[in-house]
Each structure stands twice: as structure tokens, then as C-alpha cells.
Amino acid sequence: MPDRRSFLQSALAVVGATQVPAATAATPTAAPAAPAAPPRPVRLDINGREYSLSLEPRVTLLDALREHIGLTGTKKGCDRGQCGACTVLADGRRINACLTLAVMHEGQRITTIEGLAQGDTLSPMQQAFLEHDAFQCGYCTPGQICSATAMLDEVRADGAGFTDDEIRERMSGNICRCGAYPNIVAAIRGVALRRS
Amino acid sequence: MQSIYYERARDPEEALRLAQQDGARFIGGGTNLLDLMKGDVEHPLRLVDITRAGLDRIEELPGGGLRIGAAVRNADAARHAAVRERYPLLAQAMLSGASAQLRNMATMGGNLMQRTRCPYFTDTAFSHCNKRQPGSGCDAREGFQRMHAILGASAACVAVNPSDMSVALAALDAVVLLRGPQGHREIALGDFHRLPGDTPQRDTVLQPGELIVAIDLPPSRMARHSHYLKLRDRASYAFALVSVAAALDMDAGTVRDARIALGGVAHKPWRRPEAEALLKGRPLDDAQCRAAAQRLLEGAQPLEGNRFKVELAQRAIVRALRIAGEGA
């Protein structure tokens, strides 16, 4: 897996490099030239572990996780807050890691898909996704599971019920292109009923 | 995304001071601003984070109103007991917007400041947008217009304000509290957003360096009879084609007072006191609701691609009023 990943990264870097001049030329609204903001120390608590990083302020939480810390479980789908693949928990609340800066999360407890299991014991939601076959390609799955984990707490706090409609509405920020929705709803319903 | 400086303000005074620097912008949840920065639409040089500046409280106001701090997250405001009980219209509108993740991030002030989702504005592949590049023209005029304005638009811009929250706030007569280098000022929500006119690059009356510190809700007698109806192209997680915030003060079947605000139809939440006045002092019947709806839509100038919105909006108003009238 490291081989495939580093190959992809270097391949992407080459593609990116060749595209830079064209992209710049095609952008009439380019920003006024300004000195680049230097990296700064950023301390993040990810899955109970403290990370001392040096990041440019523009680095999103998603890129910090994937590119700087090496936690690639959190996925980059649209990178624009539309698909939910990057969902992580900040102090237990689900957020889109792509639309927030890493530096904005100092002092919070960040939980990613890698932090849900206890050693080799999967979390109830992870286990339920397996049991209900709640995925096909799996790309949206880490985001779905993080989102669903936080959703259970939200439903309880709101005193709402676990109807399928309620689950669908509350999970609408996580898109699944394979269309595994029926089994995703079933997995979440299963955990909710077991817990209540 | 371009390079940016980042500073975290500890209180509003520090935020105002930091915002004096060249190219500075406030950031709350960042869900709209960072998206537009990635899309090369917004180009701040430095961001001043106001989420830890003590603006995240919800407080009772003397007389029965509520003050919601600018940095309160949309999800927290919608879940707050006083909002749910006394301003269910606001809670309902906020919960109909975006996704749970985005509502956990987005702030009240940031929601007020969110920019149009007109694709000709957000996608720089389109070269004519007077909002993004003043004087460049408007590709939406000849484009795909399903999501565009039918009221209050100008030759320069047909974009709509995308906020659900603001539509409810308009119906609730909310007031926006601002602080700037020159001191405090208060602006009625209905005057906060602008019509595009010849300067569509300006969405609001906020001046450079000014900071939204809170939103005040006056006491409301309409909590029991209110409804937010949102019509969209999919059941959840989509912007409104048309939305209606309807609120009634009912006295044994007779309308004592009424508020109707429309979303998805203009550059700002759309209200007309004359339309609301048509409902006052009468029983709530469909004919009267229809008359109010017609008055609110009077002067509509739809584009080729959104003619359906004129009728859709009127039917939505009638339905929202009927549901509001039935009561909680």
C-alpha cells in the first residue's frame, strides 16, 4: 500500500506541476501578490495522540490528517463540503474536515475512523456496517461511519426517534455513489435499536 | 488555495484591531469562505478567527427576547431550548439548510454573510459575473436560471441569497448587532442584505472592518403558529427553489398579525408589509392567503428559465400559511 500510495502521489505531483502555468494563465481573477505565510507550529490531538506539526495556515484539517500525519482513513471526495467523505469528529461533533483549517482545531479532540476501534475490537457502528454489508466500493464508508456515530448522540440529545426517514434526513450530508443507502440505514438502525 | 495568514482573536476588540490589516477577513465556521477560496472566488490575505472571541453565547433579553451570539454554531442555536420553544420557525429553517456536518461548523454571523450559490458566480470558468468581477457582465442572464431571482433583481445581477436562516430571521423581525471602528450599530434584518442594483458585489450593508457580534430576536407571539416550508430539487441537503417563512398571531381563528418572508426568489429575504396586512383581522382562509401571496409576488420579473417560480411561490405561501394556521 505505501508503494501504490507514493506512486500515486508522485504521479499526481507531475500532473500538478505541468498544469500550473495553464491554470494561472486561465485565471484573470488571481489574487494580488503577497508574501506567502510561513509554516507555524500547530498542535493537534488526533485519536488521543498529540501531534506537533509545522503547517502553513492554509492547510485544511483533511490535508493535515492525510498528507502530514499519514492518517489516510479520512477520505477526500469533493474537497468542497458536498459529499461528506471527509467527516471526522471534533469534540464528538461531526464536521467536514475539508472545509476547515487544521490550525482552527488546536485544543480540540479530533477523532477519525482510525480512532473508533478499541485495538482489534471494532466500534458498534463499524461492526454493524460489516454485518449489514453497508458499502460497495468503500470510499465514502469512513465518513459514513464517523457521521453515523455522532448522529446517534444527536438524535438522543434531540429526543427524536430512529425512524428510517429520520436517519436518512440526518445522514443526508454523506453521499454514496454506489447507492448503498438501504444497508447504511439498516446498519445505523441496528446500532440505535441495540443501544436504546 | 492561496497562501493566507491566520490569527485568532480572544475578544471582539482584538478581532476589530486585527481586521484593520490589509486584506483581512473574519472567519467563523469557514464553510462558505474556504470553499470560495478554493474556487479562486475569494482572496483574503489574512483570516481573523472569531470563534473563540466570546461571541458564542445565547442570552435572555429583558422583555422576553433572545440574543444569539454571532459565533454560535447553527446546530447549537437550532437545538437550544429557548429557540425551539419560542422561535421554532428559526430552528426549523436552520435545520432545513445544509447538512448536519455543515450546521455543526457554520456560525450565525457567517450564515448571514454567506454568498450566493449562483454557479456563474462560484465557477470562475464563466467569465462574466458582475458580483465577482464588477463590470464584466452576467452569464446567468443567458444561462441556466432555475435557481435565480424573480423579484428585486437588476440588469447587473439575478443572483439569490441562499440562506434559510435569514428568511426566518426576516419573518421574526430580528436585528443584527454590529461593532466597528466607529462603534456599535443595529440594523433590522430586512435592511441588512441589499438588492443588487448596479453594485451586486455588495451583498450586505456591512462596512469594511465591521463585525457582526449578535442577532437579537424580539419577543414573539407567533411561536405556536409558524411554519418554514422549503421546496427543492431533492428531499434534503439542497438549496431552496422557493422557501416560505410564515408566522401568525392567531386569536380564536382570526389573524391578529402575520409575517411572510420568501427565500430563493431574491437577493435578500423578500417581505412586504402590505401583503401581511391583507391577512390581519380576518379568519385565515385560502382566498385571503392567495390574495396575500399575489401581493407578495407583485411585480415579479421571472427569467425564461424560472417562470415556474412565480406560481410555485404563491402556492407555497398558501400552503405554509395553512400549516402555520393549524398550529403546533
Image (cartoon, coloured by chain):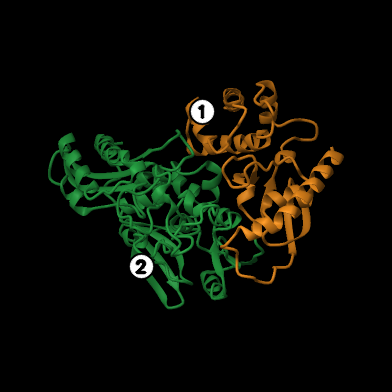
Q: Give the letter of the green chain.
A: B
Residue A11: x percent and y percent?
A: 80, 46
Q: B312 and B100: which one is in front?
A: B312
Instruction: Out of B290 and B321, give the one closest to the viewer.
Output: B290
Residue type at mark 2: give it: Glu
Up the image or down, B78 lies above or below A54; here it is above
Please name the residue shown 48% across and 51% down the image.
Answer: B120
Q: Position of residue A2 (x, y in %)?
A: 85, 41
Where disc 1 sits, the SS reads loop
Q: Colour of chain A?
A: orange
Occupied quadrant, residue A195: top right
Q: Quadrant of the C terminus of chain B?
A: top left
Q: In the rendered image, which quarter is residue B152 located in? A: bottom left
Q: Which residue is mark 1?
A: A162
> Is residue B37 toward the left or the right of residue B266 in the image?
right
Check disc 2 and report its element: helix, strand or loop: strand
- Picture quadrant of residue B319: top left
Distance between mark 1 and mark 2 Cα atoms:
42 Å
- Labels 1 and 2 positioned on one and the same chain: no
Callout 2: 10 Å neighbours few (<14), some, many (20+)?
Answer: some
Could you tell me the amino acid type at mark 1? Phe
The N terminus of chain B lies in quadrant: bottom right
Q: Which mark is residue B186?
A: 2
Chain designation of label 1:
A
Residue B169 in the image: state x and y as whole percent: 35, 53
> Residue at (47%, 36%) from the top-left corner?
B236
| Whether residue A67 can be seen here | yes
Check disc 1: other Cα within 10 Å, few if <14, some if 14-19, many if 20+: some
